Amino acid sequence: MDKDMKIVILGGKGQLGTEIYEYLKDKEEIYSFSHQELDILNYDLLEKKLQEIKPDVVINCSAYTKVDKAEEEKDECIKVNTIGAKYVSFLAYKVGAKIVYFSTDYIFDGEKSTPYTEFDDPNPLSVYGLSKLYGEKLTIEHNPNHLILRISWLYGIYGRNFVKTILNLARERKKLTIVNDQKGSPTYTLDVAKQVYELIKKDKVGIYHSSNQGETTWYDFAKRIIEILKIKDVEVLPIKTEEYPSIAKRPKYSVLDNFLLKLEGINIMRDWEIALEDFLNTYKDILLGEKE
């Protein structure tokens, strides 16, 4: 197969970066760098690497994602998600490359009761959400050839995520108490990798909501994980947000509607339950044998 594009992945060893690399490595000419190999805040080194490679596309998967910790490490979070995003976007522009940036459902305040489209006004409740919104703005400002994917409740086989946390807890406890009054759309990293490639191939620009479809609560999400994997003797119990103390405020409702993807006929994001079943059935043996 001809490899037509040179693609650089930054943050290539993280949960999403690894998935995108694995999906694209046989399709295009991929240069993947971990945070340790290429820090996006190291402007000079980043510029040198991009000038050497001269990619067609730069996919920025480098991110500060610890939502609660960000409240205490505000500067660190904003540096990576905002200033880092600005550097990557501008340096991609300088070599004539498209920039891909990933944002989050946490840019919204959760006051709606119907899914958020790309045309709803953001109003983040947390430092993390704010840093991602700033990152969007600076990515757009510094490179007209930008592609921003807003994703939510991400999980996959690489890195840490809610699915793995639930399975670890299920090994240790007979009862799991999970928040039942926050709604969102769990999203499988593989679906995101496929969707981003589709958008890149079609040379799309702008902001796209790219989550798996439908909505659920963290409680129902956890219940489905336990049910699909047929884990016995573990009870999942619902609790309210107030009963689960966390530093960062989270939106009560942050379901994303892939409005533009659907309108343009390019939505390949599946229903969240179908994607979850696919993921759990594919990696069942690994997940049930894995301990952190």
Image: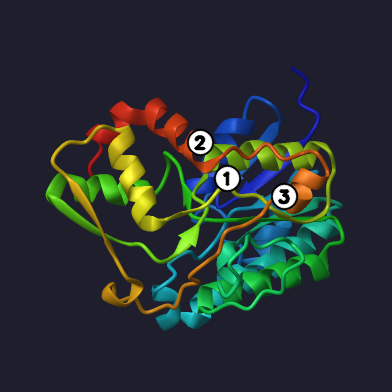
Up-down relation of residue 176 to residue 266 (above or below): below
Under circle 1, the secondary element is: loop
Q: Is residue 272 left or right of residue 231?
A: right
- Residue identified by numbered label 3: 58
Q: Give the crowd class for mark 2: few <14, some 14-19, many >=20 residues within 10 Å.
A: many
Quarter of the figure with residue 147: bottom right
Q: Are marks 2 and 1 in contact (CB under 8 Å)?
A: yes
Residue at the outermost top position: 1
- In the rendered structure, which disc, 2 or 3, sits on the residue that comes first in sequence? 3
Under circle 2, the secondary element is: helix
Q: Give the crowd class for mark 3: few <14, some 14-19, many >=20 residues within 10 Å.
A: many
The x and y percentages for residue 281 are: 38, 27
Between 200 and 214, the one lying in front of the other is 214
Under circle 3, the secondary element is: strand
- Residue identified by numbered label 1: 212
- Between the C-alphas of marks 3 and 1, the distance is 24 Å
- Residue identified by numbered label 2: 275
- Between the C-alphas of marks 2 and 1, the distance is 8 Å
Q: Quadrant of the N terminus?
A: top right
